[in-house]
Image (cartoon, helix red, strand yellow):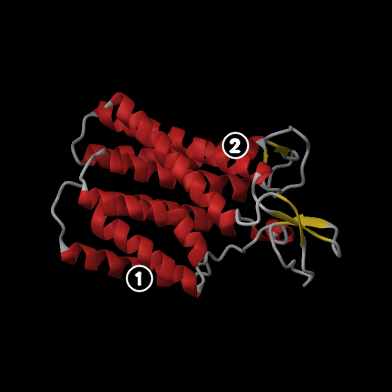
């Protein structure tokens, strides 16, 4: 992170990100605009942050994409609740990787070890949230709203389950473990690596909780009168224009994900600052 800017590394990051983005498009994980988002975020993260930043992004993208296809036939009926499908577009790519890309730019302007803590926390948060969503909807026990404890339908924004919570913890810790291993490879002390694992893991869980809290309170939600179902979509799958029933209209799912990423980053940076 303290190395001077190398244009060749940035070019290499762009080329690698483009290759990964095109592979994601071919596999159905990214839309055409999602490839652009992957190119922007991945190019900056790889090119300015270095391989240790880029590997965290790859772990997030590969694991979350794989889980989005896991038992997809069991999740098809829930698609009407979500604003978008499993093919990530530009907005989703920026919401998930935009903050890490910004931190990579800041690490070039003002080199400091805590930027990497922030990157790990941000990606741990979006990874934890994605794992919680993709696995939580498969829970045999109905989820409950994080604010009231009231039973909710699977896939409802702001609802949590034991399976989803365990998945969130696992997703966040995975990013932390990878970051810790990278630190050891770069010859950091075991103590420093352990702090990085802790910071990213806690950041991931904090970000996922923030996502659920916002989903249950401030996120815009709509109602389809034709299907009598709540949804994140302004136009339901059936073609009916929905009506807003709660939340702020400007606060959609992508914005919630971006805010959750920020919570994860701030939490990880705070823990890193406290113990380093």
Identified at 39% across, 30% down, the residue is: 198
Calculate the distance from the C-alpha at mark 2 to the C-alpha at mark 1.
33 Å
- Answer whether residue 127 is visible to the viewer in this image: no
Which class describes the residues within 10 Å of circle 2: few (<14), some (14-19), or many (20+)? many
Q: Decide: marks 2, 1 in contact (CB < 8 A)?
A: no
Image side of residue 136 versus residue 7, left or right: right
Identified at 37% across, 61% down, the residue is: 41
**Outermost left residue:** 4
Image side of residue 139 versus residue 118, left or right: right
Q: Quadrant of residue 111?
A: top left
Give the percent coordinates (x, y) of residue 213. Answer: 62, 39
Identified at 72% across, 68% down, the residue is: 235
Task: Find residue 229 and name its label.
Answer: none
Which class describes the residues within 10 Å of circle 1: few (<14), some (14-19), or many (20+)? many
Give the percent coordinates (x, y) of residue 193. Answer: 29, 32
| Image quarter hosting the C terminus | top left
Element type at mark 1: helix
Image side of residue 1 versus residue 226, left or right: left
Mark 1 or mark 2, which is nearer the start of the sequence? 1
Which residue, given by chain and number where applicable, does mark 1 sit on? 18
Which residue, given by chain and number where applicable, does mark 2 sit on? 165
Instruction: Give the total number of marks visible in the rendering.
Output: 2
Query: Observer-nearest residue: 218 or 213?
Result: 218
Q: Is residue 185 above or below residue 98?
A: above
Q: Quadrant of residue 9?
A: bottom left
Q: Is residue 209 above or below residue 2?
A: above
Q: Is residue 79 above or below residue 177?
A: below
Query: Observer-nearest residue: 42 or 75?
Result: 42
Q: Is residue 206 above or below residue 230?
A: above
């Amino acid at each position: 992170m303290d190395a001077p800017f190398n244009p060749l590394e940035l070019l290499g990051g762009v080329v690698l990100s483009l290759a990964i983005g095109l592979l994601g498009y071919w596999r159905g994980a990214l839309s055409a605009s999602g490839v652009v988002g992957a190119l922007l975020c991945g190019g900056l993260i790889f090119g300015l942050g270095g391989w240790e930043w880029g590997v965290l992004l790859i772990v997030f993208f590969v694991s979350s994409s794989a889980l989005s296809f896991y038992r997809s036939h069991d999740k098809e009926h829930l698609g009407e609740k979500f604003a978008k499908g499993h093919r990530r577009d530009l907005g989703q790519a920026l919401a998930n990787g935009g903050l890490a890309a910004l931190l990579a730019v800041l690490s070039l302007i003002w080199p400091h070890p805590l930027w990497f803590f922030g990157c790990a926390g941000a990606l741990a948060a979006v990874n934890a949230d994605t794992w919680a969503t993709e696995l939580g909807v498969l829970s045999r026990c109905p989820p409950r709203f994080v604010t009231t404890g009231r039973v909710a339908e699977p896939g409802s924004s702001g609802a949590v389950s034991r399976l989803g919570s365990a998945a969130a913890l696992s997703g966040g810790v995975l990013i932390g473990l990878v970051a810790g291993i990278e630190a050891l490879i770069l010859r950091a002390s075991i103590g420093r690596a352990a702090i990085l694992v802790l910071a990213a893991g806690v950041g991931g869980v904090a970000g996922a909780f923030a996502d659920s809290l916002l989903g249950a309170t401030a996120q815009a939600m709509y109602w389809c009168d034709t299907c009598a179902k709540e949804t994140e979509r302004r136009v339901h799958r059936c073609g009916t224009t929905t009506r807003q029933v709660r939340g702020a209209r400007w606060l959609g799912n992508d914005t919630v994900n971006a805010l959750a990423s920020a919570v994860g980053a701030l939490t990880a940076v705070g823990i890193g600052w406290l113990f380093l």
